[in-house]
Image (tube, coloured by chain):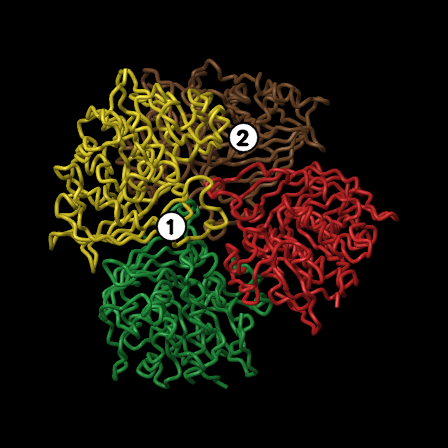
Chain colours: A red, B brown, C yellow, D green
Amino acid sequence: MLRKTKAMNRLKVGVLGATGAVGQKFIRLLADHPWFEIAAVAASSRSAGKPYAEAAHWIEPIPVPEAVAGMTVRACEPEALPEVDFVFSGMDAAVAGDIERRFAEAGIPVVTNARNYRREAHVPLLVPEVNPDHIAQIAHQTFDPSGRGFIVTNPNCVCVPLVLSLKPLADAFGIDSVVVTSMQAVSGAGYPGVPSLDILGNVVPYIGGEEEKIMWEPLKLMGELQADGTVQNSTIGIHASAYRVPVVEGHLLSVLVKLATPGVSEQDAQQAYADWQSPLAGLDLPSAPEQPVLLYDEPRFPQPKLHAPNENGMQVTMGRLRKAGLFDFAYTALGHNTIRGAAGGAVLNAEMLVAKKRIRSRN
Amino acid sequence: MLRKTKAMNRLKVGVLGATGAVGQKFIRLLADHPWFEIAAVAASSRSAGKPYAEAAHWIEPIPVPEAVAGMTVRACEPEALPEVDFVFSGMDAAVAGDIERRFAEAGIPVVTNARNYRREAHVPLLVPEVNPDHIAQIAHQTFDPSGRGFIVTNPNCVCVPLVLSLKPLADAFGIDSVVVTSMQAVSGAGYPGVPSLDILGNVVPYIGGEEEKIMWEPLKLMGELQADGTVQNSTIGIHASAYRVPVVEGHLLSVLVKLATPGVSEQDAQQAYADWQSPLAGLDLPSAPEQPVLLYDEPRFPQPKLHAPNENGMQVTMGRLRKAGLFDFAYTALGHNTIRGAAGGAVLNAEMLVAKKRIRSRN
Amino acid sequence: MLRKTKAMNRLKVGVLGATGAVGQKFIRLLADHPWFEIAAVAASSRSAGKPYAEAAHWIEPIPVPEAVAGMTVRACEPEALPEVDFVFSGMDAAVAGDIERRFAEAGIPVVTNARNYRREAHVPLLVPEVNPDHIAQIAHQTFDPSGRGFIVTNPNCVCVPLVLSLKPLADAFGIDSVVVTSMQAVSGAGYPGVPSLDILGNVVPYIGGEEEKIMWEPLKLMGELQADGTVQNSTIGIHASAYRVPVVEGHLLSVLVKLATPGVSEQDAQQAYADWQSPLAGLDLPSAPEQPVLLYDEPRFPQPKLHAPNENGMQVTMGRLRKAGLFDFAYTALGHNTIRGAAGGAVLNAEMLVAKKRIRSRN
Amino acid sequence: MLRKTKAMNRLKVGVLGATGAVGQKFIRLLADHPWFEIAAVAASSRSAGKPYAEAAHWIEPIPVPEAVAGMTVRACEPEALPEVDFVFSGMDAAVAGDIERRFAEAGIPVVTNARNYRREAHVPLLVPEVNPDHIAQIAHQTFDPSGRGFIVTNPNCVCVPLVLSLKPLADAFGIDSVVVTSMQAVSGAGYPGVPSLDILGNVVPYIGGEEEKIMWEPLKLMGELQADGTVQNSTIGIHASAYRVPVVEGHLLSVLVKLATPGVSEQDAQQAYADWQSPLAGLDLPSAPEQPVLLYDEPRFPQPKLHAPNENGMQVTMGRLRKAGLFDFAYTALGHNTIRGAAGGAVLNAEMLVAKKRIRSRN
């Protein structure tokens, strides 16, 4: 998946929750990673002790990477992963809280997809192209007095395409309020997740807890870092309605946005996207998309089946940017929920942390 | 499909565009109709002259009704259907305009699902539970000086669940503005319609011409009948975004609404639905649902697969009525697009026209 | 669902496993049954004590029947259902064995969809149109010395369309061997059943334990009743391959059959279907289809979406009956797996047991 | 998609039928081909003269390759493509016959996916791993007296996984007869192809003309090349039943096979697959899969969604190889229908023709 390879001693990573749907995605994305090498896989006591290929009900459309297939699954405890430089966490929220804290306390950086610490005052909720400066929050964390161990989170899978698609408008004109209706893929619910009887040829108008995240997380992501390491949340108004659709990968958003600046023309808005520069440009992060946000002209685009895989699932695509009566603009946005919106987002977070010297080899 | 039967001499109806997807639905709905009897089926010259069962590529999940299977398809001309009391039209817009006018001019009432005359000044755009008084527009039509022939239309398939779900709120509090994102079934595109390669496991963010209809037709439907037989359109603000989803039947709407009355509580809003009375109550129309609008408490409801068939596809269902930050309320609404939103809506229009003595036997 | 109503004191039935997918189907099918009245619903200890509408995660496309919604779910014990004349069982095989035996021992007839007793020497495995004489096995059961309590089973959901579609050929020409590839709907796996991630846009080539049932149960169904109340299994050769497809209801079978009689023409084979008479004709059973097996001429028929609902899901449909090179004939067969192949089949079994005076009112 | 790159002057290829579904797949597969360079795209008169990106309704999940997007579509005539060394044809059978003949007569090799010449006495029907020696038929073709122009075909998309999965058994034990039920993806019908209303949540038991191809083409593919350049067809008995399922890519086959050798054990059969060597090994063809046939142990494999993409869509996968009562063995096989079974198969054919010096640069 990676275009940019460079010779280096690869960092040793552990994957927590390795047998689950997000854990599998981590393993796939890290299979040939130029900077990171999977040194250990860990999961619940039900899986611990078994070879990975046997413990995991593998659902990715490629074989289990050979280097991992034979690894013995370990317990999710810092002592069980002594050799890792940091860990990725794909654990369920039900158990992630305690375990992640213990790793951070043990001096091991935790780059997690779980939601448990997203609202913690000093834990960055990070989309590298949107709020890279929030990394500075790490210095204020108290998990590990030595400063080595910390926790960094990535947001809910809808929030990533939402804030990335809003960012060029936010930078150019400011944003007053946002209405979003999401049409979310079943992979967002993990495995076994959504029963087929519920979703085949159907749409389900409710996803428990989802709308709250979509209405809160962007406020922190687009908030202002303060001197004390906290974030002053944005005051943008957001309303979200979340629907489940029979799509495998790719959350599609119907978005309406009111800008803080009146009178912005359709041409100006499109120009904002053309002009916008990713703050990651030049960092040469292996998983960073060339173009984090792509705006299509073709009205039938983007579509989950066609465009979720763009740039290895790391690009957010948009279309139908148009003036909207009650608001200023309407558009469609799409993000690959289990890559850009989950494991891939965490990998990119880790890459930025390495580039910013926040994660280093322990040897 | 009909609960209420009464002995009467059934009116003779013709179905125009009888071989298409909407035409087939008309034939299915009229198969055992207590008031109407299919006397003739008509279609394009490609089908005319053939037995119906051979001319139609039948896609309904019941066999072709026996009474129709052997009928010879006729041409879509008034002269070819001398015995009918009125016609239903399921023709494509490409041809419906001229043909429907010729039938009206020939003194034959036309109850159509086609969009051609929806915006005509004196043609009613009708949802019987919403604007039954608009029937009076017929008297101002000039197709047929004798007054026998006229045209009545039903709206776009999204507009029906939209206006029916808004109606109780409109009556109780008035409506300021509405935002709707529709997730529309493939049957809305007719047959062959949407290619499976486009929609299997996918969502398409564009349906040509659809959003314009959703943003205009409710204004006429909720408009005020004037003394001159025109309608003063409502000034409600509407924004619509239309998406195609892999569902067979049932358009699902994510709706936000701002009321004209401030401070309405969730309880008040729910009470408005409980209190609302259909103007059709007491008319005993065979296709009228007992309860035109049903509001579910269960947050996972309504769903197209489960609830589009409610009350033979004639009921609009709603759920998740809740306070919404930027607006007043958010909710989900669902309507069966090819029954309530198309053929069934037209049948109900005809039933009301019969009850109101606008359609009578010609003999 | 029922065409034939007759005035009678309805028998009181209990539904065991009432909250599961099969149990829900029983409740739906019995909602307006002319002979049976749901007197009690029972389920596992997790549900017992709750109102039914709260205990069941209802997945049927109609509301919970009012008469049942408020019933308190009882424990699955004979003592808890003192008023019932007999019970239907939709329990999982994991628990059905013991519980069903206890009901039979308590003198309560058990009409079950579970597989536990299908291979028992004196328990009828019954498809009423195929082997009605096997009812005589009941007299040889020893569960209840008084003879009141007994167990009757219906077969696996694939076996029903398989044996019904073979029956006219078997009667006319005898059958040597059969090859079947089944394409099975997800509802066959119950709820939550098949994860959507496994089946959306996919086919799964394995269903645990299924092929063994398809290769064995037809041998008993088509076997000869012996004087000692056992059945001498048929010696037909059967090979089965079972696949899961993204269909909601309706198992479709691709069948090859070699007849015991050589040289049968396509016309003769078709005539066998035209001539075949159901042994249920004249019994006037409420759930019996008018035509248990329907053979279509149209090569694109039958299809699960269009024809599984035929005759309220009780008809088996067939198509493409044609000469086949290595065998004698090939054809497609379809059966509604959760109605004809499960709950509906059990209801029909019970109706025949009533007609044959094997089930009576206990009062 | 290509692992093996080598420096060479790339051959100039034309793509006939470039705007259709198969043509688009050719363009995608050739985008970075190490041996071939798209020099021209041609299509029907409706598209000729337009830029490719405008003429094609692009449905591939990657953008139109830049090198092709701006090319002007040409007419499908030899004179319009003077610079090409050979052409790939993805044309519809309705027009392919005449056009392909004219290209061959003009001295331009034609590597086609169309079915028109598959049964011609001297036209190879080619799967390179199965019957590479059939290339010798080319010398007997009379289209072009100079010997430069000729036609080579690849088989129907079901036949490729069928013959590849049979080949190791055929080589080791000989094959007596085969029964296959295919579950075919919608992409096999091209674009727009199968209407979504026909296939969403459904299976269609008939694909016009398909079974005839599946029952005939393998006989030629597994036939013996004769001295006169004809092929003596195999006498294997084959019966095929073709079904359409709601899958996007990947035809899945349920296969029964009777071997010419009696008493082969399951272990022997598995060993035959382990031992089998592709005749392409060592040729280093860019599109050749490392392992043309992969046999899974896991009973739930292969699945279209997971395994059709294996080895860039060029690998045939198998599973559940097991003893079968009436036959010798049953198994499941899977092939990517639009890559391995269509455009990718043709590209591999062309690569072998280049490796065998049958196609050369004309300059």
Residue B307 appears in view: no
Q: Left or right? Give the position of B289 relative to A293.
A: left
Q: Amino acid at mark 2?
A: Pro
The residue where tag 2 is placed is B161
Image point (19%, 37%), residue name? C131
Comparing A124 with D253, the one in front is A124
Please, which residue is most extreme toward the top here? Answer: B282
Disc 2 vs disc 1: Cβ atoms closer than 8 Å? no
The answer to whether tags 2 and 1 share a subunit is no
The residue where tag 1 is placed is C208
Q: What chain is tagged by disc 2?
A: B
Type of amino acid at the residue the image marks with label 1: Gly
Where is residue B148? Give x, y as percent: 43, 21
- Left or right: D131 in relation to A128: left
Which of these two is toward me, C350 or B360? C350
Task: State the SS at label 2.
Answer: helix
| Residue closer to the observer: D326 or B329 | D326
Residue plotted at (46% across, 76% down): D79
- Residue A307 percent location from the top left of the image: 58, 55
Quadrant (top left/top right/bottom left/bottom right) for the C terminus of chain B: top left
Assign the N terminus of chain B to one quadrant of the image: top left
**Above or below D216: residue A159:** above
